[in-house]
């Protein structure tokens, strides 16, 4: 059974640019959630997708957007990057239960 | 407002010295409480899910317990490889799949 995978592992962007992060769900999971984790903090919920529809959103501006595809993989897009967007971005997948299983994360640095 | 607070922020133990980590929560209807372990620069690794007060779960040297206001993660005779940040998260009845995390407890076990 394949776990949650994310790409790329690391990314460096400059302020104002756009970025796309990718996530492949664990086999059999139809729900994907995205979180932002600043250094020394707990993860903060960005949004969740269930069967290609957004199923809840945290307190993040509209420049954070997402997609889920028919194979349940997902993308997180961030436009107009700001310095404060530098963080570890985590994807988690879940199936019929509530437990979310996390991927290794993408470390984004905005200069 | 739904909230999770973990204490202490950091804990240093000698190998074999048992202790407990605390997770206090305020939530309007608990759907589940989750414990994760996170190594530096990596994604959270799932440990336990607890659903109702009085529930307990064990895995190797770890035991998680739940009351109506808090959860404890008991570590018995820890080893250096137990060093990590331990995250607690709650899921509320009216918040879809959103996980609300505490800031974590950084555990260091010295040989």
Image (spheres, helix red, strand yellow):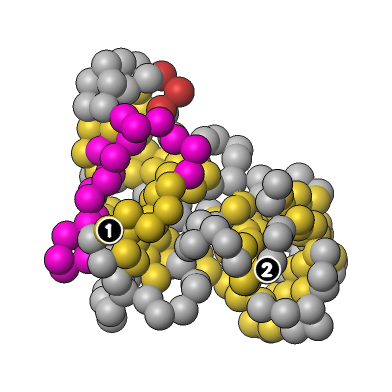
The secondary element bearing badge 2 is classed as: strand
Residue B21: horizontal and vertical position, in percent?
A: 79, 61
Any mark on residue A53, and which? 1
**A82 in relation to B84, above or below:** above
How many neighbours does mark 1 have within 10 angstroms: few (below 14), some (14-19), or many (20 or more)?
Answer: few
Residue B10 visible in the picture: no
Q: Quick check: B70 left or right of B90?
A: right
Chain label for disc 1: A
Residue A107 vs residue A15, the one in the foreground: A15
| Quarter holding residue B79 | bottom right
Residue A81 visible in the picture: yes
Residue B24 vs residue A3, the one in the foreground: B24
Any mark on residue B63, and which? none
**Which segment is the magenta one?**
A58-77
**Going 50% across and 73% down the picture, which residue do you hit?**
A98
Chain label for disc 2: B
Q: Residue furthest front?
A: B94
Residue A30: horizontal and vertical position, in percent?
A: 29, 71
Q: How many marks?
A: 2
**Going 26% across and 76% down the picture, which residue do you hit?**
A27
How many neighbours does mark 2 have within 10 angstroms: few (below 14), some (14-19), or many (20 or more)?
Answer: some
- Pointer 2: what residue? B30
Residue A23: horizontal and vertical position, in percent?
A: 26, 55
The secondary element bearing badge 1 is classed as: strand
């Amino acid at each position: 059974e394949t776990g949650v995978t994310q790409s790329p592992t690391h990314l460096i962007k400059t302020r104002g640019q756009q970025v796309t992060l990718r996530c492949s769900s664990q086999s059999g999971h139809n729900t994907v959630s995205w979180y932002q984790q600043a250094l020394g903090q707990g993860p903060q919920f960005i949004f969740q997708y269930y069967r290609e529809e957004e199923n809840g959103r945290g307190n993040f501006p509209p420049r954070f957007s997402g997609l889920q595809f028919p194979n349940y993989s997902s993308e997180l897009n961030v436009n107009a990057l700001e310095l404060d967007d530098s963080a570890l971005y985590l994807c988690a997948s879940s199936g019929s239960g509530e437990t979310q299983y996390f991927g290794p994360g993408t470390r984004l640095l905005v200069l | 407002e739904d909230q999770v607070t973990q204490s202490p922020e950091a804990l240093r133990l000698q190998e074999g010295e048992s202790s407990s980590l605390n997770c206090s929560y305020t939530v309007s209807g608990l759907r589940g409480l989750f414990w994760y372990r996170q190594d530096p620069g990596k994604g959270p690794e799932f440990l336990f899910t607890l659903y109702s007060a009085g529930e307990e779960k064990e895995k190797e040297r770890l035991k998680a317990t739940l009351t109506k206001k808090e959860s404890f993660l008991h570590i018995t005779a820890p080893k250096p490889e137990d060093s990590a940040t331990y995250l607690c998260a709650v899921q509320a009845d009216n918040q879809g799949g959103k996980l609300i995390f505490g800031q974590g407890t950084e555990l260091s076990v010295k040989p």
